[in-house]
Image (cartoon, grey):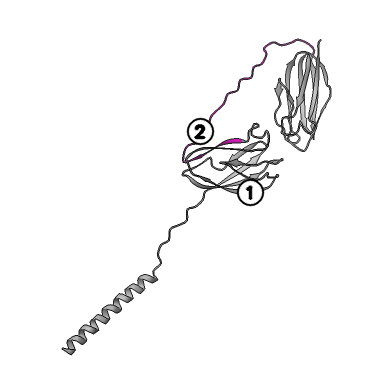
């Protein structure tokens, strides 16, 4: 009887040791851990006056990082879903993290006065497709032309001044030869008649427009340039 009990005891001990070994082995095995969700990063390149996003959409709701780089020549910022960078000087970078809790279209823009109007705005899609809307603006122009000698005017744009070869010209077709000699972007806007292109440093353009007698205001459309004195007038006289 004692021998039987001894055999049973030894067997029980061996079984316990085996179970302990298995348990110990299981404990030493690495348990897979859940991977942290990768936050997508969108690079936002700012120029004068445009945004370029490395991607215009993300596949699901959640956090998104926006790495914003200013490659323009003046200060800009970037705002989306109520989160905004600071005003970034040329060459500066800032990364912001934005949490999108609903799918859909989210507007982004530069909040500097006038920059959105000049093109610094757009839509970012979260778990949806980017919807591009094309707005057609119809500008009413008079089909009536006036005859007259007209003339040619050279315009030199500086920081912050228009230098014109003439400020008075007779009615008719007037040709403007425009050059940006400044260190910033400028344009020549003959208010109510034609807004010239935004020209970079040493940029040039030439265009001709028919002008009736009157006094025409001239401004630079770049924000704050009017405040700094970039205005002029042109007087068109009757032939």
Q: Earlier in the sequence, mark 1 or mark 2?
A: 1
Comparing 174 with 48, the one in front is 48
Asked if the stretch drawn in magenta spans residue 146, the answer is: yes
- Quadrant of the rendered image containing residue 190: top right
Q: Which residue is most to the front? A: 82
| Residue of label 1 | 94
Distance from disc 1 to disc 2, alpha carbons, whole Å, reads 27 Å
Q: Which mark is residue 131?
A: 2
72 vs 182, left or right, is: left
Q: Which residues are magenta?
A: 121-149
Q: Which residue is most to the bottom? A: 2
Comparing 216 with 162, the one in front is 216
Figure label count: 2
Q: Is residue 85 above or below residue 167?
A: below
Q: Residue at x 72, y 30 (%)?
A: 221
- Quadrant of the rendered image containing residue 211: top right
Q: Is residue 45 above or below residue 187?
A: below
Q: What percent of the width, then of the height, locates residue 239?
A: 81, 10
How busy is the neighbourhood of tag 1: few (under 14 within 10 Å), some, or many (20 plus)? Answer: some
Q: What percent of the width, then of the height, locates residue 231?
A: 79, 27
Q: What percent of the width, then of the height, locates residue 122?
A: 57, 35
Q: Secondary structure at mark 2?
A: loop
């Amino acid at each position: 009887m004692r021998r039987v009990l001894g055999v049973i005891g030894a067997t029980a001990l061996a079984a316990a040791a085996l179970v302990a070994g298995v348990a110990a082995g299981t404990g030493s095995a690495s348990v897979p851990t859940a991977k942290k969700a990768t936050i997508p990063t969108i690079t936002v390149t700012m120029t004068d006056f445009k945004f370029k996003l490395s991607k215009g959409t993300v596949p699901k709701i959640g956090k998104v990082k926006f790495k914003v780089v200013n490659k323009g020549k003046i200060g800009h910022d970037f705002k989306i879903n109520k989160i905004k960078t600071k005003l970034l000087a040329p060459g500066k970078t800032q990364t912001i993290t934005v949490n999108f809790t609903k799918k859909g279209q989210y507007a982004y823009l530069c909040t500097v006065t006038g920059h959105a109007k000049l093109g610094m705005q757009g839509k970012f899609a979260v778990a949806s497709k980017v919807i591009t809307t094309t707005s057609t603006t119809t500008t009413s122009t008079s089909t009536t032309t006036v005859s007259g000698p007209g003339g040619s005017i050279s315009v030199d744009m500086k920081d912050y001044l228009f230098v014109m070869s003439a400020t008075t010209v007779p009615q008719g077709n007037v040709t403007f030869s425009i050059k940006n000699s400044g260190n910033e972007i400028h344009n020549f806007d003959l208010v109510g008649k034609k807004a010239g292109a935004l020209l970079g440093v040493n940029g040039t353009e030439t265009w001709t427009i028919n002008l009736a007698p009157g006094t025409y205001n001239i401004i630079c459309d770049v924000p704050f340039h009017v405040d700094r004195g970039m205005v002029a007038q042109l007087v068109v006289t009757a032939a």
